[in-house]
Image: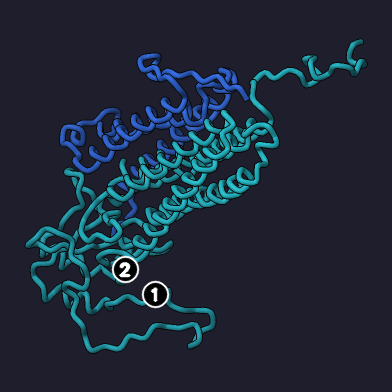
Amino acid sequence: MDTTVTTGTEDSVWGGGNRPLGASYGKLMMWFFIVSDALTFSGFLVSYGFSRFKFIETWPIADEVFTHVPFFHGNYPMYYVAFMTFILIMSSVTMVLAVDAGHRMMKNRVILYMFLTIIGGAIFVGSQAWEWATFIKGDYGALETKGGRILQFVNADTGKRAALADFARTLPEERVKHEKSEGIWYQEEGYKTSYSLNEVIQGFRANPNILIRTETINEEGEKTLLTRGESLEKLNDAVMVVEGANLIRNEYGSRLFADFFFFITGFHGFHVFSGVVINVIIFFNIILGTYERRGHYEMVEKVGLYWHFVDLVWVFVFTFFYLV
Amino acid sequence: MAHEHKLEIFRGLLKFKSNTQKIWGVLIFLSIVTAIEVGLGIAKPEVLTKNYFLGMKLLNWIFIILTLVKAYYIAWDFMHLRDEKSSLRRAIVWTPIFLVAYLIFILLFEADYIYNVFKDGFLSWDF
């Protein structure tokens, strides 16, 4: 009959006094969120794996796609992404230092470390925006065939990729971008490429040292290079010029690659962005002394969990998008 | 919030004097692992790309294992799972691992099947 007695419920097992997991309500809820969010990201990454296994022989090679570093010209695969990874791990470290300082009630240190964390997050988001812009703008340009496959160009003398501008001819032809305002309602061209299909084909025929590279990966783990004869043959299949990448066309290869790139890194970037916003809010709360008055800095620990989770996801995105 | 921190990593091989020191130690370890990954990704040694284990390149196995190692240390030391009760830790870790392993198994098998249909079936998609 002790259930009717209301005194001392805090201590009784069924009255809420029992804490089997030894963690506060807020922290548990943050863990709930993290586990479910982890499953969402897993769903995305596994569906990326699905599409990749489906087109395992023609999937783009990430090293050849992400080769740029800001303010530097040339071919530097992976370096910039590695830098981004390091920045994110670094901001994770400053976050965990902030949590540690919070446990010891050192307000000024928490402020400093939270500030550094926010800076790290901002650098990461900025880098990702730059990475997107570079990816969208494109590198060399390519042709797309009737079946939606991508044909890229290689200079036979140097063995390096050839940009459309290297060999395409400029013909005296008029090509006007189709705007929404003319003709049929609500129809317009997405973008106008710098060369027309005809100009690329004419230029290709006039330059005997340019070869076509298909999407197919050979036994060496590289894209298949066609001979000049095969290239001329293959050129007949081309139907349009593609420059850069968007959700529909992708000069780097399989369209799904671009779709997943935008979707997964975009979703992750959104997490980083919201993490930075939350960190800023907590940062001001610390400055105002909210947690000093509350007597503990558990709020910093909770946003810290979220921030580390964002880092954790990036570790996986980095592996499956850039390394494997 | 008097928190007790377990200050040893690598199963007690490396003991730290304070929590702050442990954080820096883990950072150094994670940086080394990332550097190895990037180095291998740029160098791509032939021994690792030519040999396969269970249908996947050795290099890719190394990447995935190193990723899981990194994930372990982020979760255990940065997210303080090492200091939580084992019941909470297991609930957090094994639930997604079980579900994700199942998802990976099912989707990759299906994708491989579709790959074979595209390859051997009377279907032309590369034109």
- The image quadrant that residue B42 belongs to is top left
Residue A163 vs A301, above or below: the answer is below
Q: Which residue is mark 1?
A: A191
> Is A274 in front, or is B107?
A274
Colour scheme shown: by chain
> Cα distance, mark 1 to mark 2?
9 Å
Secondary structure of the residue carrying numbered label 2? loop
* Residue A154 horizontal/vertical position (percent): 16, 62
Give the x, y percent position of residue A241: 30, 71
- Indicate the chain coloured cyan by its letter: A
Residue occupying image coordinates x 64% and y 45%: A285
Q: Which residue is mark 2?
A: A243
In this rendering, is residue A17 above or below A226? above
Residue B29 quadrant: top left
How many numbered marks are there? 2
Q: Which one is earlier in the sequence, the residue at label 1 or at label 2?
A: 1
Cβ–Cβ under 8 Å for marks 1 and 2: yes
Dividing the picture into quadrants, the one containing residue B85 is: top right
Q: In the rendered image, is residue B117 in sight?
A: no
Q: Amino acid at mark 2?
A: Glu
Of A106 and A39, the residue lying toward us: A106
